[in-house]
Image: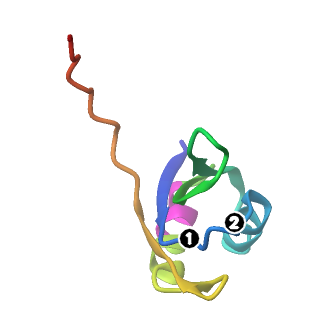
Amino acid sequence: MSKKLFVGSLDWNTTEDELKSLFAGIGEVEEAVIITDHAGRSKGFGFVTYKDDADAEKAMAELDGHQLGGRTIAVSEARPLKPRNERRY
């Protein structure tokens, strides 16, 4: 089963390849994604999905507080997206 991690406080210039490379040092990464705005600029956070839950747990323990691109990153288990309230105008 796979487990998704939230990675916050990313430097604006961090690439998905750099993110994946860092986390691949712990275990097999399925996907590494940096969230961007409508103009394609990084929002400063992303998600990494591991194939193995044990690797994800190890990554949280070892990489939370790690330096990447001159910033201290925060790594935690990703929470499910909450449904938005539909707004009608």
Along the line of sight, which residue is nearer the eye, 58 or 80?
80
The location of residue 62, given as percent across then percent down, is 52, 82
In this rendering, the answer to whether 81 lies above or below 68 is: above
Query: Which one is earlier in the sequence, the residue at label 1 or at label 2?
Result: 1
- Left or right of 36 on screen, residue 72: left
Circle 1 Cα neighbour tier, 10 Å, few/some/many (<14 / 14–19 / ≥20): many
Kind of residue indicated by mark 1: Leu
Which residue does the numbered mark 1 point to in the structure image?
10
Along the line of sight, which residue is nearer the eye, 2 or 47?
47
* Residue at 79% in and 61% down: 17
The location of residue 51, given as percent across then percent down, is 63, 49
**Mark 1 or 2, which is nearer the eye?**
1
- Determine which quarter of the picture holds residue 70: bottom right
Which residue does the numbered mark 2 point to in the structure image?
19
Q: CA distance from mark 1 to mark 2?
A: 9 Å
Specify how the rendered protein is coloured: rainbow
Along the line of sight, which residue is nearer the eye, 11 or 57?
11
- SS at mark 1 in the image: loop
* Residue at 76% in and 68% down: 18
- Left or right of 4 on screen, residue 27: right
Along the line of sight, which residue is nearer the eye, 55 or 80?
80
* Residue at 62% in and 68% down: 12
Label disc, if present, on residue 27 of the rendered structure: none
Question: Is the residue under label 2 in contact with that under label 1 (CB below 8 Å)?
Answer: yes
* Residue at 73% in and 67% down: 24
The location of residue 35, given as percent across then percent down, is 57, 49
Range drawn in magenta: 53-57
Q: Is residue 64 magenta?
A: no
- SS at mark 2 in the image: helix
In this rendering, the answer to whether 67 lies above or below 43 is: below
Kind of residue indicated by mark 2: Leu
Circle 2 Cα neighbour tier, 10 Å, few/some/many (<14 / 14–19 / ≥20): many
